[in-house]
Image (tube, rainbow, N blue to C red):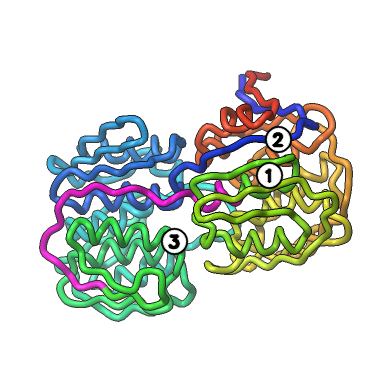
Amino acid sequence: MEKVIKIEGGHRLAGEVKVSGSKNATVALIPAAVLAGGPVTISGVPDIADVDSLSKILRILNADVREMGDHLIIDPTSMVNTDLDADVVTKLRASYYFMGALLGKYGYVRIRMPGGCYLGPRPITLHIKGFEALGAKVRYDKGCYTIKADKLMGAKIFLDIPSVGATINILMAAVYAEGRTIIENAAKEPEIIDVATLLNKMGANIRGAGTNVITIEGVRELQGCFHEIIPDRIEAGTFVIMAAACADSMKICNVIPKHIEALTSKLQETGANLEIGVDSILVTKSERMHGVNITTKPYPGYATDLQQPMTSYLTQATGISEITDTIYTERFKHCLELQRMGADIEISTGKCYVKGPTMLYGDKVTATDLRCGAALVIAGLLADGVTEIHDVYHIDRGYDNIDGKLKALGGVIWREKVE
């Protein structure tokens, strides 16, 4: 028996929805907390499967982990640097952040190859390059990475591409390194600023987060602290797209509008009605949407994670929209699922063409990855009839209480066990 999400389409949404704490920040903040010498309290933690997986990894390391509402209290005082070869490590991509955290704290880590959504090749070459520049030796055998350093020394590291994961991993490895580390061509995503803010609260000396040059002065110790996570810009963007697609009037709260400017400007280009406030966005029904061209780029460009949800929206826009993904050129499996529902989409190498408007019809579809799942939820809300989404564990990895939030907005959504 498998649990699926079912959505009855055709019901217009209305009301307010509050965005949860950032999933992409949370999955880096939790490993970063092990660098502290005392308890770290993280507030605004989303209720998602990836947090459960990371908590299990912390417990393998003998860290004390407690949940109090949306607060996660991590006490690494009694931690033991155990090899991370358990199956839970392969359940998510972000387990690789324990590489930088444990290397930084202990000078040694052995960990299985991380998992997560398949979006095409996702090598960790840049992470390894950074660790080696700091003085570590890296070996891969029997499905595990062994990373070891007698002493970590500050270094100048140039990233071939501005990788978010590599930037954060090098940050964590470098906080205890002797001397100065400079990361050039660093990624600029808000989640990197959030991780650097946490580390600085703990006593690290990091400057330049959010720019393409980050400087880390090594320190000898870090203490515990309290930290509140930034809002999830991808969840915010997903709900803004959802509102533009099928809401009469919907307010998305707990948003940092600057974080999703690339999305909101594109939606306005299609004819969507957006009223952008200080920390909220009000979306009202538009009578006519027209197609646009989108190219994903590193932040502050259009986010690859919002490419798939936008595809569902563009099936309702007049004309042909061209979507090009320069980050993950194979990230178009959602198009095959949308075609099952009646979407007129042509897939090419690294891009797709969406012709609209087209009527969507409920069908059995599969969430092949997290953001594909979001795209199918939007399509299900738009479709005539009932949509049955399989492999919903992908959705639960990144969206906090999506069922409850949609029900409160007037969506008809439920879960069932099916053969």
Q: Residue at x 29, y 72 (%)?
A: 207
Residue receiving disc 3? 190
Q: Secondary structure at mark 1?
A: helix
Residue 93 visible to an observer of this rendering: no
Q: Residue at x 75, y 64 (%)?
A: 269
Packing grade of label 2 (10 A; few <14, some 14-19, many >=20) is many
Q: Is residue 236 magenta?
A: yes
Asked if the residue at tag 1 contacts the one at tag 3, i.e. Cβ–Cβ closer than 8 Å, the answer is no
Mark 2 or 1: in front is 2
Residue receiving disc 1? 242
Q: Can you give x and y, in whole percent of width and height, for residue 99 in the image?
A: 31, 56
As displayed, is residue 333 above or below residue 407? below
Q: Magenta span covers which residues?
A: 216-237
Q: Can you give x and y, in whole percent of width and height, for residue 334 in the image?
A: 71, 48
Asked if the residue at tag 3 contacts the one at tag 2, i.e. Cβ–Cβ closer than 8 Å, the answer is no
Q: Earlier in the sequence, mark 2 or mark 3?
A: 2
Residue receiving disc 2? 13
Packing grade of label 1 (10 A; few <14, some 14-19, many >=20) is many
Packing grade of label 3 (10 A; few <14, some 14-19, many >=20) is many
Q: Earlier in the sequence, mark 3 or mark 1?
A: 3
C-alpha distance separating marks 2 and 3: 29 Å
Left or right side of 365 for 327? left
